[in-house]
Image (tube, rainbow, N blue to C red):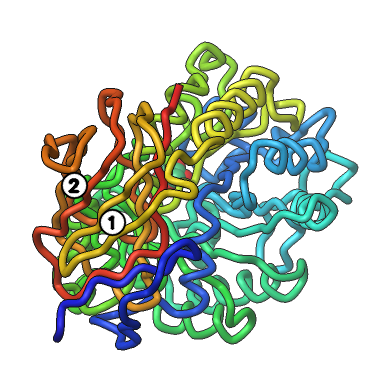
């Protein structure tokens, strides 16, 4: 392949148009998913009230009794935080369904909450619609309550359960399959029919992005700290691997496979608090806006998406500390990316590098680069240098992969000229964006 560097900015003349796709490329659905960048996770259920993380499934449904639930508060906080949607634990490992499922006897219907007439899925889907954000569902395959768990019949139950959710509450953007299964050596062994699960889910909602250790559309990053590998290929080999036990090694999930056969984007899930569910004793563990921004740089800034868990409390509300941190996080993001100092700059391209010539010296400590991933992920390594005259470019920073977005932070430099040199690429690099900032 002829290596001609191509840029797609309004401000510069395009050298050439490398239309050819290279390697695995994202589907239209995956491209739209990458653009979402940041959305919220909400763990809510009996555990919220029992102080557990993994409910046993034998809890009295009456423990689920939020006293002042307001899903509109959840959705409006998500919206105000700039999150594109909410993924809710419709069913966690304890099997408790937040909607009155016909296929379970362990649901909101069996609780005294709203005299058994409540339906969290209905409330949340209406609230998300009202706020103009999207919604997704976590439906745990592992079920510690269902009497048929551990038998082939459970696979039908699981499919029916999905069908109820996927046909009764409008469109979801994502379906979340966690890989956990804490059954001990004498526990029930369920052989999940994931092929049928996937086919059925996509039959009901073809646009769904399905998350699991190995996709098919979105992958786990191998940790729950929200940190994606500094090198992150959106490519993964899945043949011979399974979800949960039998998944690729965590470091592979964290960085993807250089030559992976499938496009499977990385999603960083992390909680704003210590646990996934609300615990009163963890009120002092809420991450600050600055910590959240750091996680954003290490997830979205490494080409993946950030799924930030903000668990509603026992009243059924997002606690004020959590919402304050979210607003702070939003403020920091807005301030960070308010003034692109590259705007209006002269851009020169050569075979393997791009130079940004600014009208005057600026202070710079952050670069945001984007690849046109619809044509494949191509950049392997690059170096950034800069200076005040065209004769001397001093090293500033270096990076590996770019993908959907790469945020590079470095000590502030006063410069007029910036050079990005692509030192290793799989094919002609195609950038979709290049911005410079002085992040406060
Ligand atoms: C894990 C689960 O076991 C945790 O409870 C939590 O839901 C986390 C997001 O995924 O697999």
Question: Which disc, if any, is residue 251?
Answer: none
Residue 392's image quarter?
A: top left
Q: Which residue is drawn at 77% across and 40% down?
A: 76
Q: Residue at x 18, y 47 (%)?
A: 399
Q: What element carries label 2?
A: strand
Location of residue 100 in the rendering, given as x and y in whole percent from the top left corner: 76, 58
Side of 186 relative to 92 (left or right): left
Is the residue marked by circle 1 packed among few (<14), some (14-19), or many (20+) residues within 10 Å? many
User: Which image quadrant: the N terminus?
Assistant: bottom left
Q: What element carries label 1?
A: loop
Tag count: 2
Residue 332 or 187: which is nearer the viewer? 332
Location of residue 355 in the rendering, given as x and y in whole percent from the top left corner: 26, 53
The residue at which mark 1 appears reads as 402
Location of residue 334 in the rendering, given as x and y in whole percent from the top left corner: 58, 34
Does residue 162 appear anywhere in the picture? yes
Q: Is residue 412 above or below residue 161?
A: above
Q: Which residue is drawn at 41% across and 71% down?
A: 217
Side of 289 relative to 103 (left or right): left
For ligand 1, which image quadrant applies? top left
User: Which image quadrant: the C terminus?
Assistant: top left
Residue 171's image quarter?
A: bottom right
The residue at which mark 2 appears reads as 399
Is the residue marked by circle 2 packed among few (<14), some (14-19), or many (20+) residues within 10 Å? some
Say if mark 2 contacts mark 1, CB within 8 Å: yes
Q: In this view, does 364 lie above or below 99?
A: above
Q: Does the residue labelled 2 lie within 8 Å of ligand 1?
A: no
Q: Residue at x 44, y 52 (%)?
A: 305
Location of residue 271 in the rendering, given as x and y in whole percent from the top left corner: 47, 34
User: What is the distance, in whole Å, between disc 2 and disc 1 at their CAs?
Assistant: 8 Å
């Amino acid at each position: 392949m002829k290596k001609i560097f191509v840029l797609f900015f309004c401000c510069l003349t395009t050298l050439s148009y490398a239309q050819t796709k290279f390697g695995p490329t994202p589907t239209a659905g995956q491209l739209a998913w990458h653009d979402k960048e940041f959305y919220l996770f909400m763990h809510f259920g009996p555990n919220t009230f029992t102080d557990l993380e993994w409910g046993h499934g034998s809890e009295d449904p009456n423990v689920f009794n939020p006293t002042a639930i307001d899903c509109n508060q959840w959705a409006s906080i998500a919206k105000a935080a700039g999150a594109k949607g909410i993924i809710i634990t419709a069913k966690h490992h304890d099997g408790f369904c937040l909607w009155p499922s016909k296929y379970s006897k362990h649901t909101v219907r069996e609780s005294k909450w709203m005299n058994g007439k409540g339906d969290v899925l209905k409330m949340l889907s209406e609230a998300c619609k009202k706020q103009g954000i999207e919604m997704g569902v976590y439906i745990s395959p592992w079920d510690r309550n269902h009497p048929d768990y551990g038998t082939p019949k459970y696979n039908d139950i699981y499919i029916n359960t999905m069908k109820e959710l996927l046909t009764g509450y409008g469109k979801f953007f994502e379906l979340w399959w966690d890989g956990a299964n804490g059954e001990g050596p004498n526990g029930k062994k369920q052989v999940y029919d994931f092929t049928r699960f996937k086919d059925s889910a996509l039959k009901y909602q073809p646009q769904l992005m399905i998350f699991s250790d190995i996709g098919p559309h979105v992958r786990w990053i191998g940790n729950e700290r929200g940190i994606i590998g500094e090198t992150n290929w959106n490519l993964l080999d899945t043949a011979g691997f399974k979800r949960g036990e039998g998944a690729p090694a965590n470091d592979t999930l964290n960085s993807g496979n250089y030559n992976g056969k499938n496009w499977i984007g990385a999603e960083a899930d992390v909680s704003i608090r210590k646990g996934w569910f609300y615990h009163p004793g963890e009120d002092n563990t809420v991450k600050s806006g600055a910590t959240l921004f750091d996680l954003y740089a290490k997830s979205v800034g490494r080409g993946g998406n950030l799924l930030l868990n903000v668990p509603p409390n026992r009243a059924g509300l997002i606690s004020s500390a959590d919402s304050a941190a979210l607003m702070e996080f939003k403020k920091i993001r807005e301030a960070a990316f308010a003034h692109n100092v590259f705007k209006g700059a002269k851009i020169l391209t050569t075979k393997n590098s791009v130079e940004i010539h600014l009208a005057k010296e600026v202070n710079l400590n952050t670069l945001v680069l984007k690849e046109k991933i619809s044509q494949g992920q191509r950049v392997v390594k690059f170096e950034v240098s800069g200076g005040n005259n065209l004769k001397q470019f001093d090293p500033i920073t270096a990076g590996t992969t770019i993908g959907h977005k790469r945020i590079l932070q470095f000590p502030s430099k006063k410069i007029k000229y910036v050079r990005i040199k692509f030192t290793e690429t799989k094919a002609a690099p195609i950038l979709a964006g290049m911005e410079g900032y002085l992040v406060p």
